[in-house]
Amino acid sequence: MGRIPTQPASPTALLLAWGRGETDAFDRLVPLVHDELRRLARRYMGRERPGHTLQATALVNEAYIRLIDIKHVQWQNRAHFFAMSARVMRRILVDSARARGNDKRGGGVRKVSFDEDLMGLPEAGTDLVALDDALLALEAVHPRKSQVVELRFFGGLSIEEAGEALQVSPDTVKRDWRFAKLWLLRELRGERVAT
């Protein structure tokens, strides 16, 4: 009797299996998401200073290592995975920037500009550490709005994908996005922001 070919599992199915403790699910997931994670890493690395010692491939590999170590995550779907991947990559780069001392005045800080189409902000370039600090401040008072920025700006997710990851409507994401853009712009300019 002939063997029935098995359907390849979807990223969401593999994420759910991985979340249940099926360790081989991660190995099967990696080839399905690798290209998208490399795109995400290239996007991050494009904002880094020239000659940065960390390359996109190394960033993806380090992200895999950190993702494997994350325990007790109830993976919801593909968008949730990429949101977490964006957060992990951001942490790796911020940790690297802090280790280089780029958070000190005059420390050769590489400017990071918000993509005008994506963020809707004027040339409000800032260093990665300052942006991370501003996002952490936003997260302290408006956690979901901070997540929206992380998903949209860092993760490259659409409004709909961000809504899916956060389990809110696209209209809610749009409102949070508008608020967060203004909040961050003011924070990065050193203006007092009312919460």
Image (tube, rainbow, N blue to C red):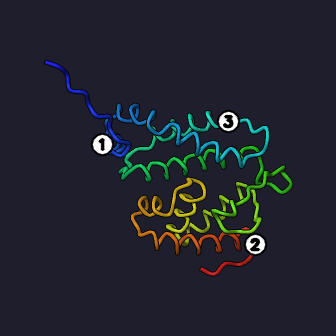
Mark 1 residue type: Arg
Q: Which residue is mark 1?
A: 20
Q: In this rendering, does residue 98 appear at all?
A: no
Residue at x-position 41% and y-position 70%? 169
Q: At which x and y percent is residue 8?
A: 32, 34
Viewer-closest of 67 and 164? 164
Instruction: Name which quarter of the figure residue 63 lies in.
Output: top right
Query: Decide: marks 2, 3 in contact (CB < 8 A)?
Result: no
Q: In this rendering, does residue 119 appear at all?
A: yes
The mark that comes first in sequence, 1 or 2, is 1
Q: Which residue is mark 3?
A: 55
Residue at x-position 31% and y-position 41%? 17
Secondary structure type for disc 2: loop
Alpha carbon of mark 2 to alpha carbon of mark 3: how far?
32 Å
Q: At which x and y percent is residue 81?
A: 44, 48
Secondary structure type for disc 1: loop
Query: Decide: marks 1, 2 in contact (CB < 8 A)?
Result: no
Badge 3, how many Cα within 10 Å: few under 14, some, many 20+?
A: some
Mark 3 residue type: Gln
Residue at x-position 61% and y-position 43%? 41
Secondary structure type for disc 3: loop
